[in-house]
Image: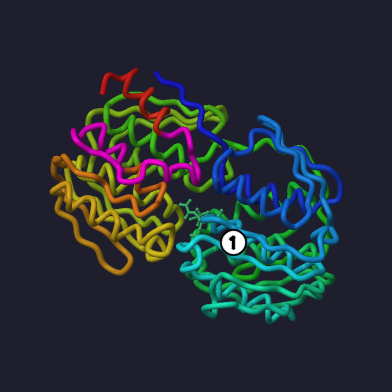
Amino acid sequence: MTVVQIPGSKSVTARALYLAAAAQGTTTLRQPLLSDDSEGFAEGLISLGYAVDRRPGVWTIDGRPQGPAVAEADVFCRDGATTARFLPALAAAGHGSFRFDASAQMRRRPLGPLTQALRELGVDLVHEEAEGHHPLRIEASGIKGGALTLDAGLSSQFLTALLLTGPLTEQGLEITVSDLVSVPYVEITLAMMNRFGNPAHRVGDTFVVPPVPYTATDYLIEPDASTASYVFAAAALTGNTVTVPGLGTDSLQGDLRFAEVLRQMGAEVEITPEGTTVTGTGRLRGVTVNMRDISDTVPTLAAIAPFADGPVRIEDVYNTRIKECDRLAACEQNLAALGVPVTTGRDWIEIQPAQPAGPVEIACHGDHRIAMSFSVTGLRTPGITLDDPGCVRKTFPGFHQALAALRAEWGV
Ligand SMILES: O=C(O)C1=C[C@@H](OP(=O)(O)O)[C@@H](O)[C@H](O)C1
Ligand SMILES: C=C(OP(=O)(O)O)C(=O)O
């Protein structure tokens, strides 16, 4: 059995940073993620005047319930959508003149439903270039609050940004949502808001956030379940056993359900309060699976799908086309280059059984998940290389070393 320590959850780290910044008092975050996304989030907060002290394994943040400490800031959100969507909402609840920009891909990704909602709440906000996209400028003078509607069909992050901001408004927020994707991420948001003392909750399609201020706390960040999907897939693919401690029955993350998909395909999976263990059994069955709730693990499944004994069909994942790249297109392109029969539609991909054949240089499209997923394919496919191995820095800078250690231990 191989024990793998997986770095902290990107989603939990981002929310914890926001909540700590907005809370009364000093918060301690234990085992935060060290990666481009989480460091970009922390540095975004620093640009807004928050005191964030980063020491190995422990970050402390002095909260400011009244909002940013500076009257003006120019915040670069890098490639992280959590940063690019959560921080403008935080700034809007404060007072000052704030400009936000992001990477070329993040500029292309949608922001409109969030900025539209902020405008409905009275926020003075201008898109400097394309309407509904970064860069943007906010003249913030606080938010009164109230009821609003939100289309969350492209991203749940619009809803999370508004939920996190609710307690900073005078009256709180009541947000009625249509077409919500990535529901488990909203559940993470509510659970963490509750941990920081705000009783936000869901009633049908409406999310209620009372104007109860956040209180600082001591928070242990759990390992990242999307990151764990690569080592779980690696075990299932090569007939080995992997245990990820700290990611178990108490996890807040929906992406742990990827282990259940592997179980459906024939792997042995044990999830306990201490962690999750996946054992490859030498057999992978074909499967049809709706991954609307866990779409960050679509590339992981697509990349091992050719080794199943029947077709693998992944459904209801349109919004994977508007992530770090068009992930359905990138999976299709790379699988086809490996000689694997694959078809896609607007919101699905279907992969037929085949032994992938190298040599092939995987086109990563700058997307950490494409890089990590097809590296797993490489455990059973000679000749796979990546055109951009460094893009894993977004969530898992140590990925290649971790995979090399598994290869050495398993002799694959
Ligand atoms: O809120 C979050 O932390 C996230 C929500 C999901 O995005 P969408 O809601 O856009 O699907 C997920 O893909 C992303 O990696 C992280
Ligand atoms: C989609 C992702 O990131 P984000 O939307 O937070 O940039 C991801 O990490 O797979």
Q: Amino acid at mark 1?
A: Ala
- Position of 175 with respect to 79 (left or right) is right
Is residue 74 depicted above or below 287 in this figure? below
Whether residue 83 is visible to the viewer of this picture, yes or no, is yes
Query: Does label 1 point to a residue whose CB lies under 8 Å from ligand 2?
Result: yes
Q: Decide: is 191 above or below 71.
A: above
Q: Position of residue 336 (x, y in %)?
A: 17, 53
CA neighbours of label 1 inside 10 A, class few (<14), some (14 to 19), many (20+): many
Position of residue 231 relative to residue 46, above or below, is above
Please provide percent x and percent y for residue 220: 68, 35
Q: What residue is rendered at 34% in x and 43% in y? A: 373
Residue 18 counted in the magenta span: no
- The residue depicted at 82 percent of the width and 72 percent of the height is 171
Does residue 256 appear anywhere in the picture?
A: no
Q: Position of residue 323 (x, y in %)?
A: 43, 60
| Quadrant including the C terminus | top left
Instruction: Locate the N terminus and report the quarter of the image it occupies.
Output: top left
- Where is residue 2 drawn, in percent x and y? 41, 20
Residue occupied by mark 1: 84
Quarter of the image where one finds residue 49: bottom right
Give the residues drawn in magenta, as a range: 374-399
Q: Nearer the viewer, residue 309 or 398?
A: 398
Callout 1: SS: helix
Q: Is residue 211 above or below residue 129?
A: above
Q: Is residue 291 left or right of residue 47?
A: left
